[in-house]
Image: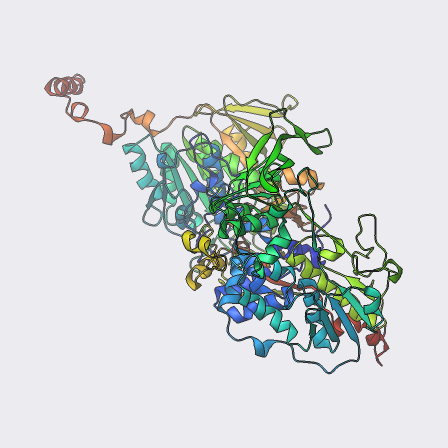
Amino acid sequence: MTYLAKPRLHHPSLTVNKVGYTRRDYEGKISTLCAGCGHDSISAAIIQACWELDIEPHRVAKLSGIGCSSKTPDYFLGASHGFNTVHGRMPSVLTGANLANRELLYLGISGDGDSASIGLGQFAHAMRRGVRMVYIVEDNGVYGLTKGQFSATADRGSKSKKGAINSDSPVDLIGMALQLGATYVARGFSGDKAQLVPLIKGAIGHGGAAFIDVISPCIAFNNHAGSTKCYDYVREHNEAVNRIDVITPRSEITTDYAPGDVMDVLQHDGRMLRLRKLHDGYDPTNRLAAMNHVQTHQAHGEVVTGLLYVDTDASDLHEALNTSTAPLNTLGRQELCPGARELAKLNAALHCGG
Amino acid sequence: MQPTNVANPSYFHKVVDCQWACPAHTPVPEYIRLIGQGRYSDAYMVNWVSNVFPGILGRTCDRPCEPACRRARVEQSNGEHPEPVAICRLKRVAADMKGDVSKRLPRLAPRNGKRIACIGAGPASLTVARDLAPLGYEVTVFDGEVKAGGFIRTQIPRFRLPESVIDEETGYILDLGVVFKSGQRIESMRALMAQGFDAVFVGCGAPRGRDLELPGRHEAAQNIHIGIDWLASVSFGHITSIGKRVIVLGGGNTAMDCCRSARRLGGTEVKVIVRSGFDEMKASPWEKEDARHEGIPIINFHAPKSFEHSHGQLTGMTFEVVKAVYDAQGQRSLVPTGEPDVLVECDAVLIAVGQENAFPWIERESGIEFDKWSLPKLDKDTFQSTVPNVFFGGDSAFGPKNIITAVAHGHEAAVSMDLFLHGEDIRQRPDPTTNLLSAKMGIHEWSYDNDTSNDHRFKVPWAKAEMALANIRVEVELGFDAATAFKEASRCLNCDVQTVFTAPACIECDACVDICPMDCISFTLNADEPDLRTRLKAPALNQTQDLYVSGALKTGRVMVKDEDVCLHCGLCAERCPTGAWDMQKFLLEPALAGASCRDRKKDSQLPGVVA
């Protein structure tokens, strides 16, 4: 924990983005998490991604549940909307907010306890409904706030700080997200921002439910030998399937790759994701193949990272429900009370079948 | 890049920009912290040990520390006017607000039987006396004037430096058992050397003001004065008035003192006219500003051509208008623009176009050799002349500089003389004393105030212009009050509290990278320095500031910290989970003459010590 506010002074070369903000303007309050917490790195990656994408902070809503991870929205995007929900209930509050105003960018920040234990059902339904959001799970495999019990994502056989061996099977959030229909599924590592920032940028530009599982070591309770969520283990077993460059529509593409080594994915926001393949034959647009690949490598104790699956033709809940294109708070009397004639039309439509 | 060797004292010394830039290497952040704590006497003594004249320097120093101060770089693009910490004026606070320090001054040591002569009672000689008298040397200081101080007393106007301050600080030295032979100008080096002194120190300054041999110089001599001589006469009260219209020639600090003095002695239309451009003038920016503040215009690119006179009276001066032209090597030359010459009418001219060394009193057969510029041939580290027991320092050594440089020379010459008189090799220079100590007091507690102030530089209050201009003895600057001094002291970044990195403890969690407000820290693959400088989180464009590079970490990357704009806020260390970063207070004190500089030979001869 740190009690000093981060000094306002910044590097002389700090520049503003297209909407007139410096990277520092996307910061929030000073973190009160333990020193070295992986979650702080994820916050920094979100700040970097939002600055690079020229996002206006007031167009973002960040929602979270309860836990160390769910505290972090206080530490980034200090000028954005925020909502700290009941434990595990972030997905449904976010779904409601999204239905009311589809024009905001929704960041759902959760942890392995908040999403894989108490909120598992909520997580599952947000994924299967295709709520357009960036769903980030800051996954450390441990209950940090209650001092180090195994969480639901801790691998079977991994060791707690006190030496206990975990006998339960882990909840595989990546596997569930793939199965339940998420259209952008990725895994990152808090210790590798070069990979994580583009993954977050890709998720922000995606047109449907985007899920990122970020392995985020808990320095205080889960960074020891025998843990599969510690820095050393993740670094040794990290199997990245690809690397992403996010390409804005007008930016020049300067790097040359041999054909077949790259795959371009056009995003909902008009940007291009250029995927550099690191695994021969890995096709991130094939959901079944992705599930297979992740499961196979996971069985060998490997941590598969990168953009695992992306549906280039994603749709979201609004499309399915054919909802209003305008935010509800902008609808006037005319739209809300269209009059007797419209009502008659509606009634007629209901009767025509009976 | 190779991992940085922080065991080399000059690495962390260089990070303390102010101390590195100071010729005497005064530990600036150390005394600024003491001022912030209200420990003025302690702050004064830190200064006194290092620079001998804190009260004098706190008003008049050339302050090479301030252009070097990190604060000005840190404030770039963070506000309208990036400004360094007011280091010099804080020094004055320590001097003004201290208590009685007489009990803290060195005690008189028993005489060691060695006699030393110092020629001139200026800052260099007095520093030698201060360093050597407490060691038991019998130091005799000769000066042509009645009181000690040299050019500090004769040339610096009283409105910048009250006489009481000079009396106090020269007094501290003379009270150390120093014999002061006032009113005794040394006219013959040979005669002095015949008096059997064991060593002689020449600290007589650069006493001759340069003249301008232009047409009309002799005819109008009555109203044309050499700047430093005129200032001395003003200082002693021999001159109390000057004509209404005054031209001051020259662009150095002496010119600034001349014009501001003239302004107070009846000069209502005082102008400074200088050959070079305004920006290339030698005067310190603040002295130029002070002059302009008093309504004195500075006219640049005017080369003096002739003095105009009629019936033995000066009537004006003619100037040629010039411009600066740079050749391919960047060498500047001033060439006429072709515009018609300019006549400036005046009643008096003060010539302040430089000073020269003059040693008519040193006989060539004394064995002291001089170079083609008539400067003594000296060893630049030891200040020893071609006669082994004769040393030089201050302006008389390498030409006119400033007080703090003279003090630095005095310290080094004193070390040399002490070694010399103990029969040791004076080329073997003593190392500085260094200390590196963790500042950690608790999880969020440091032994310094790490909460960086956002204040802009505070202005020193000035006496009312009408009062200041009416009397040449009224001090213009009033000094900070305690509350403002505290706030100004808080602007100091504590650059001496170093960020120390221990690579084996690092787990590469990025916490330091994320928290650093100035984007100083990067973890990246190693490369050559020019390459590395471009690939950091923020580009390291200031080539004069070092990169702190670790050895290889677990992932094969290295930690690279750009020292340039580090706030020394300690947040990297607070956010570091493993203590790989620590804030450690670095203290460097240059060696002063004394036993610690010369006893290494004896150590090796002690029983049980293997050399």
Question: How many marks on residues?
Answer: 0
Quadrant in which residue B540 is drawn:
top right
- Using the image as rendered, state which of residue B143 and residue B238 is in the foreground: B238
Residue reaching furthest front?
B311
- Using the image as rendered, state which of residue B581 and residue A157 is in the foreground: B581
Query: Residue drawn at (48%, 36%), measured in percent from left and top?
Result: A49
The answer to whether residue A263 is visible is: yes
Give the quadrant of the C terminus of chain A: top left
Q: Give the left or right position of residue A341, taking residue B534 as reference.
A: left
Q: Give the left or right position of residue A203, taking residue B139 as reference.
A: left
Q: Give the left or right position of residue B29, taking residue B478 as reference.
A: right
Taking A177 as reference, is B418 above or below it? Answer: below
Rendered location of residue A89, percent (x, y): 33, 45
Query: Residue drawn at (50%, 45%), measured in percent from left and top?
Result: B244
Rendered location of residue B397, percent (x, y): 75, 56
Rendered location of residue A284, percent (x, y): 54, 29
Q: How is the image coloured?
A: rainbow
Q: Give the left or right position of residue B598, taking residue B67 as reference.
A: right
Taking A118 as reference, is B107 above or below it? Answer: below
The answer to whether residue B430 is visible is: no
Taking B31 as reference, is B373 above or below it? Answer: above
Residue reaching furthest left?
A340
- Using the image as rendered, state which of residue B182 and residue A289 is in the foreground: B182
Rendered location of residue B449, percent (x, y): 49, 61
- Using the image as rendered, state which of residue A182 and residue B603 is in the foreground: B603
